[in-house]
Amino acid sequence: MTHSLKHLIVVLCAVLALAPSVQAKDEISPQDFVGQASAASLAEVESGKLALQKGTSEEVKTFARMMVDDHSAANEQLQALASKQDLKISEAPSLTEQAKAKILQMRGDASFDKAYANNQIEAHKAAVELFHTAANSEDETIRDFASRMLPKLEEHLKMVQSLAVDVGARE
């Protein structure tokens, strides 16, 4: 492991330790939801584009194309919702996701597919949890959006868990 990769891992651990967790919350404000959901979706698009470049298996590239397409469409819907409710979307992935992306970029061809699959499992578990929380929101627009998107995210999670098995990752 190179020195810079070790340094990035240490930074990632520090960021994760300081990152707010949706898991401890039963509710989320409309602004927090829109901010977190848009940042996560941007991360999905960026990591999908990276997987299209660096992925070695056709299964990874197929999944990555779907992530780029589905999350780009979701971003457009979220932008429209945010505009109607005067909420601010994120313009970049969270610092945690940016750190994970840097680590993913440094992966060699031999380990990229496994790392990407594992990254996507964690990202989709977090997204499903965020959208479950938002699906119980008191804000009708947020609740409806989250409820409408949740089945697709759950489908993505199942697909990437299967992909992880196919590429020999941990799941």
Image (tube, helix red, strand yellow):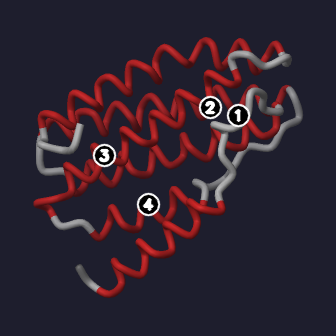
- Which of the two residues, 32 or 141, is positioned nearer the viewer here? 32
- Check disc 4 and give the amino acid type: Lys
Which numbered disc flags the more N-terminal residue, 3 or 1?
A: 1
CA distance for labels 1 and 4: 24 Å
The image quadrant of residue 143 is top right
What label sits on residue 130 in the rendered view? 2
4 or 2: tag closer to the N-terminus: 4
Residue hosting label 1: 79
Which disc is residue 118 wearing? 3
User: SS class of the residue under badge 3?
Assistant: helix
Quadrant showing the C terminus: top left
Outermost residue on the front side: it is: 24
In the image, which disc is placed on residue 100? 4
| Residue drawn at the location 36% of the way across and 84% of the way down | 4
Specify few, some or many for label 1: CA neighbours under 10 Å numbering under 14, 14-19, or 20 or more.
some
In this rendering, position of residue 1 left or right of residue 137: left
Q: Position of residue 144 (x, y in %)?
A: 71, 12
Q: Amino acid at mark 1?
A: Gln
